[in-house]
Structures are given as C-alpha cells and as structure tokens.
C-alpha cells in the first residue's frame, strides 16, 4: 500500500508541476499570447483541478486505510468531478474550432479569433460544465443512500452513486440518459467535425512541407482528444460485469490521474514555442540569480 501511495503521489505532483509550468509560461511569455495557447492554459488549469478532485482523497485513504466517506462529501466530489470533466469536453471542442480557423481561414484568423471571442468561449466552457454538473448534483439530493452501501471505485462518480441508492433513481437515470446523450453527441460533433474540413484543406496543399506543417499543429490536440474520449468510452459505455471491475478501475485511474499528466507532456514535447518559452524563462531566472 505504501508503494501505491508513493506512486500516485509522484503522479499527482508531476501533474501539478507540469500543468502549472505551462500555465505560468502562457501567462508570462508574450510570444505565447495567442488563442491557441490561451486555450492550452485553460486546459492546464482544468487538468490541475481535475486531478485535485480525486487524488488528495485517494492518497488520504491509502495513508489512513480508511474506506468511508460521508454522503455530502461524496456528492461534493461528484459535482466538481463532473463539472471539470464536462468543461474539458467543451474546451476540446473550442480548441478544435481554433485549429479549424487557423488552418482553413488563416488570413482571417486574428479577426475571427479575437480576444473577445476567446474569452467568451472560455466562459461558455466553464459555465457550461458547472451548470450541467449542478443539474445532476441537485437531483442526487432527492435520493437516500443505504449506510451499508459501497462504491467499487477510488472516488465518487455519478453512475456508481446512483447504483447504491435506496430510492427509485428513475428521474435521475432519465435526465442522465437524455442530457448525457444530447451533450455527448453535440460535443463529439463539435470536436471532430472541424477535422473533416481541416483534412480536406490539408489534402489540397500541394507541398509536402506545407502539409506536414499544417497537420503538425493538430496532432497534439488529436492525441489528447483520442486519449480522453477513449478512456471515457471504456468507463461509461462498455457494459460493466464482475470480470471488468478491475479493468474499469484501471481506466478510471488513467482518466482521472494519468490523462492530466499526459496532456502537458504531449503539448510540450511536440511544441517548439513552448520549449523556447521554457528556455527563455530558464535563462531569465539564471540572470536574476547571477545579479544577486
């Protein structure tokens, strides 16, 4: 158990450090003050918050060997987890739109993706995630839960919480099904449809260098989207069974802890501007230290 604690603690600390570094670089480096990195800074902040909803409680349980949590604390965790998860899906859609404008309408990019538009999109991302989560969470308050119930996961999640209720969860399940399917279809469409037009535009570029350069601006985002949705599909859409419990827990860990760590690594390793901004910050700090 101590080994698991150290392992997850290192992952959590690395997640905070890498995402905080990207957030700091975008905030302080003038060369990164454009829409693409504005959304990337939002993603870094989301990932820090996303992992902080689950990791501290899990680490506490590993140290104290506690397996109990109060219903109010569990519902609070559900609210923040769903809010941040839905916000991330909205943000990935906004980033797809940004890449579509950058590649398909490059001459009008600065005009279309103005700071006013970017801040409005970011506001919709955060407000949309919180409002959707609030609906699901308020409906949980109408339910009563059995004291002897147990959740087969390392944190509270909406489907698992509904499964252990002692009252009829029909309304909750109906709202979750209707709203969940509606939001999922809309977000998936908004995320992947721009890439149909992006791919068509890239195929029209005659030079191989131009094609490679255009596609390289999308590969990081596509990788993050694929990992994020791949984990969610396995957790929520693959039928659960007794044989799949451990595998489901594994993908839950990947979604809640590993993905927030992978996202900054994927963007930073493939991004020349971020690497250069990091080097500039390093040399700037070095000069400051030398002056004392």
Image (cartoon, rainbow, N blue to C red):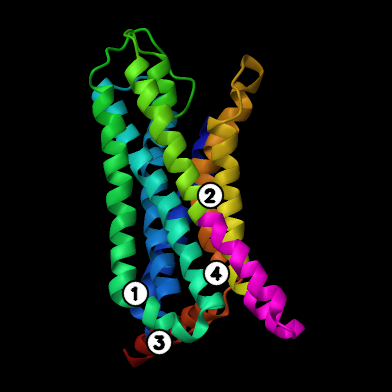
Q: Which residue is mark 1?
A: 27
At a point 44% along the width and 66% down the height, the residue shown is 40
Give SS at disc 3: helix
**Dots 4, 3 in contact, CB < 8 A:** no
97 versus 128 height, above or below: below
Q: Which residue is mark 3?
A: 284
Label 1 CA crowd tier, 10 Å (few <14, some 14–19, many 20+): some
Give the residues in magenta: 191-214
37 versus 157 height, above or below: below
Q: CA distance from mark 4 to mark 2?
A: 14 Å
Q: Quadrant of the C terminus?
A: bottom left
Circle nearer the N terminus (4, 3) = 4
Tell me: 145 left or right of 244: left
Tell me if residue 2 is in the magenta stretch: no
Residue 142: x and y, percent? 23, 18
Q: Which residue is mark 4?
A: 268
Circle nearer the N terminus (2, 3) = 2
Q: Main secondary structure of the magenta part?
A: helix
Label 4 CA crowd tier, 10 Å (few <14, some 14–19, many 20+): some
Q: Which residue is mark 2?
A: 259
Q: CA distance from mark 4 to mark 3?
A: 19 Å
Q: CA distance from mark 1 to mark 2?
A: 22 Å
């Amino acid at each position: 158990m101590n080994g698991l604690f150290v392992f997850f603690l290192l992952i959590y600390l690395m997640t905070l450090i890498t995402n905080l570094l990207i957030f700091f670089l975008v905030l302080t480096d003038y060369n990164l003050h454009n829409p693409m990195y504005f959304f990337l800074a939002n993603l870094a902040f989301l990932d820090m918050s996303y992992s902080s909803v689950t990791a501290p409680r899990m680490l506490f349980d590993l140290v104290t060997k506690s397996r109990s949590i109060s219903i109010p604390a569990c519902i609070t965790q559900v609210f923040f987890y769903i809010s941040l998860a839905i916000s991330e899906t909205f943000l990935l859609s906004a980033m797809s739109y940004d890449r579509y404008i950058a590649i398909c309408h490059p001459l009008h990019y600065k005009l279309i993706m103005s700071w006013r538009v970017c801040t409005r999109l970011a506001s919709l991302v955060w407000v949309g995630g919180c409002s959707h989560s609030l609906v699901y969470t308020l409906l949980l308050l109408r339910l009563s839960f059995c004291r002897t119930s147990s959740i087969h996961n390392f944190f509270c999640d909406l489907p698992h919480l509904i499964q252990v209720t002692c009252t009829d969860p029909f309304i909750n399940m109906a709202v979750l099904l209707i709203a969940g399917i509606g939001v999922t279809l809309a977000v998936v469409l908004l995320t992947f449809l721009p890439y149909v037009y992006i791919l068509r535009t890239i195929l029209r570029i005659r030079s191989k260098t131009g094609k490679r350069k255009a596609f390289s601006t999308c590969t990081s985002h596509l990788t993050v989207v694929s990992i994020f949705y791949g984990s969610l599909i396995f957790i929520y859409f693959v039928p659960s069974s007794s044989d799949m419990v451990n595998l489901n827990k594994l993908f839950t860990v990947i979604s809640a802890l590993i993905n927030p760590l992978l996202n900054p690594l994927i963007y930073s390793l493939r991004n020349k501007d971020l690497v250069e901004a990091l080097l500039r910050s390093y040399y700037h700090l070095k000069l400051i230290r030398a002056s004392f």
